[in-house]
Amino acid sequence: QIRTAAPHVHAVAKALYGVVRKACASNPANQAILREYIPQMTSHLPCDVGAFDANVQVYSSSRQLLEALDNDVFRIQVEAMRTARRAGSVALVIETCSCHAVPVSINQDRWVRYLLADNQVTEDLILDTEVKGTSIFLCSRKHGQHSRRIDIGALMRRGEAKLQQELSEGEWNTGIASDVELLYYHVEMLRLFENLVLGGNVKARAVLLRNAERFGVSFQQLLAITKADVPMAMHAQCVRLLSALYIDVETTNQRSYAVPNTTRVWSTSHTRVFQDSPESRSSVSLTPNLAGISPLIAPIPSAMQRPPAPSPVMALLPLLP
């Protein structure tokens, strides 16, 4: 591995591929020029120097090219991710799942096959989620054994701004990922799960639900995270994943989940008159029981009634000549 054998060469190569990535970003002309170098960049995929990033940037504007990516690109990228778990690597995988916000289903299915179908791969790539009361823990595995346990609450006590600073400082880290880096790596994995089911991908959703507890995406786990003290990015991503997996789903056997009410229904009003009326027991009728209301309205005595206010025009009449 060039990362360990020649770390300086690895750092230079990664910087050069960073230049390639920026040169191709939203630039179709440069993307067209670099397509002839795709075989050479593909041969650099196992070196983890940013070749996959460059490939994605070259293909990102073309759905046809994204669909034509070779299976070896997916397989080699998965092996690179098993070696170094980085949030940036997952973000690049996400880029291949859609083109201009339209799902690329063939790539979604390939990532499901290479990332989620192999138990050994999932043990290395997907962190376990433990929920204990209001505390959330992430557990890292290697070869089936738990190697690290990350207390998200303890990290949050440093302050979210400090976590972001540590994450940016570790961008070029070539060693073992820190707890903060693994935390945001997990957030990106949750975003990947959301993008795998984008557009109603049945295969991806079935795999995620079948392994929901193991992948940390069960309804109870995601809901508990949204109520715990976690980074805002993690909270927001869990809400989106809840919607993608359990709420915004078109299926005949969909389980009913309680969605928070944002309005007050008329029939649930606690006013005594409406509570006792027949209409209050109907969710359709919104007409109050006027018969029940009228006895409560006492007539106003004539002595208390005020005379009508004079019209402004009538008030000016005595002033006219």
Image (spheres, rainbow, N blue to C red):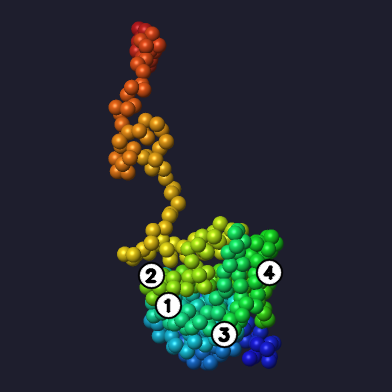
Who comes first in sequence, dot 4 or dot 3? 3
- Res 249 → quadrant: bottom left
- The residue that label 1 is drawn on is 108
Q: How many marks?
A: 4
Corner quadrant of residue 182 = bottom right
Mark 3 falls on what kind of element?
helix
User: Residue type at mark 4?
Assistant: Glu
Residue 315 seen: no
- Crowd band around label 4 with a 10 angstrom C-alpha radius: few (<14), some (14–19), many (20+): some
The residue sitting at 68% across, 72% down in the picture is: 169
Residue hosting label 3: 80
| Secondary structure under the numbered disc 1 in the rendered image | helix
Q: Are marks 2 and 1 in contact (CB under 8 Å)?
A: yes
- Which labelled disc corresponds to residue 166? 4
In the picture, the quarter occupied by the N terminus is bottom right
The foreground one among 306 and 320 is 306
Q: Where is mark 2, residue-wise?
A: 199
Q: Is residue 7 above or below residue 317?
A: below
Of mark 2 and mark 1, the one earlier in the sequence is 1
* Dot 3 amino acid type: Ala
Disc 2 from disc 1: Cα separation: 10 Å
